[in-house]
Image (cartoon, grey):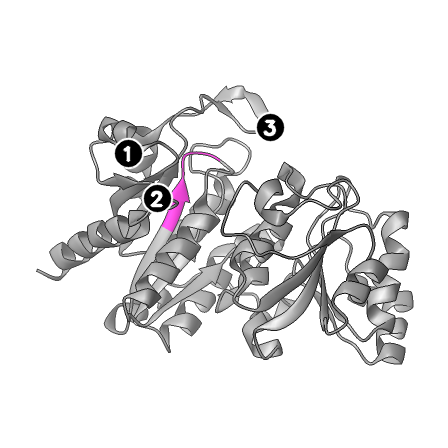
Amino acid sequence: MNLREAFDPPVPAIVLAEGEFGEAGGKTAHGVVMHSDVFDVVAVVDSETVGETPAAVLDSPSAPDVPIVASVAEALEAAPAADVLVIGVAPAGGQLPDAWVRDIETGMEAGCDIASGLHTFLSDDEKWSSLAEACDVRLFDVRKPPASDWLRVADGSVDDVDADADVVLVLGTDCAVGKRTTTYELFAAAREMGRNAGWVATGQTGIMIGAHEGVVVDRVPSDFAAGVVEDLVASVAEDHGLVFVEGQASLTHRAYSGVTLSILHGAWPDAVVLADDPDRHHRAHFEQFDVDGVETERRLIEDLSDAAVAGISTWGAATEQARYDLPAANVYDDGGAAELLAAIDDVLAEERT
């Protein structure tokens, strides 16, 4: 899915983040507020943080100065030009909370398209599709998997990309260690340098913030995940000389390694950046599993592909980055993404010699 093609960015948007703005469950909302190249956020809906600022809630001075209100109706009063309502939270259990129904109806009745990260697909529900038709608005279910006739097994056709573009994959030592953020920051830094860069998302947040192509890869049947990633990488490489690919989970994660390996083999990258939280010792949401660490992850990546790990995207401070035996930087630090780009370029130059 490419939301850049569906809209004329930047589109004024309201973000529904009810109960999760500033919390772990609001990561899609946070990504849209902070980074979206598609949506220009004009208001946030979250009754828990009403009256605060996004900068304070997200602890980021660069967050946009927009109101946080308790309902979509209030958001529309504050920002009547909004054209899109982004549902930036996927509640536990995957169902649409009853309390959100009126908010979504209000947005549609005001002429807002809906970009939804819910596990429930609004476009498959007769009530919502009929209301969308009546209101002349569109429904975008970003988690919806590709149609079956678009699925195929990987066949190595991504190798043909090598003549046109370099492919850089961002993997990690665990879930929620900054893979998507690192991917976006590398892409943004490359563009600032005047490079013809594009990127591929493999989760709903990346699609929402404006990846050139994307799929929620954990909704793709396992046999076809690598083939889908191949097609996305090849598509972005047609128009870009440098393609960044967002990874998921980690190769050493007993719950999610299958999707990680599918992305690695589907993208078949020229270089890899590895995201790591140096202070994490147990896996997020899986305290029974230890994090295996950078060296183990690096060895598996290089054993299972032709790529070299170029550098580490770390949450650690500059004084702690010497613990790695590879170039390391925090992409939130000034020049951090540029440092990682330089390490990537070194690896790519070695491959060409």
| Circle nearer the N terminus (3, 1) | 3
Quarter of the picture containing the C terminus is bottom left
Would you say residue 11 is visible in this rendering?
Answer: yes
Q: What type is the residue that disc 1 sits on? A: Ala
Secondary structure, mark 1, is helix
Left-right relation of 195 to 292: left
Q: What type is the residue that disc 3 sits on? A: His
- Furthest residue to the left? 353
Question: Residue 112 got which mark?
Answer: none
Q: What type is the residue that disc 2 sits on? A: Asp
- Residue pointed to by mark 2: 333
Range shown magenta: 170-174
User: Looking at the image, is mark 3 or mark 1 nearer the viewer?
Assistant: 1
| Circle nearer the N terminus (1, 2) | 1
Q: Residue at x 75, y 43 (%)?
A: 91
Front residue of 110/240: it is 110
- Residue pointed to by mark 3: 285
- Residue pointed to by mark 1: 318
Secondary structure, mark 3, is loop
Say if 135 sits above or below 22 in the image.
below
Left-right relation of 253 to 115: left
Count of numbered circles in the view: 3
Whole-percent x and y of residue 167? 32, 61
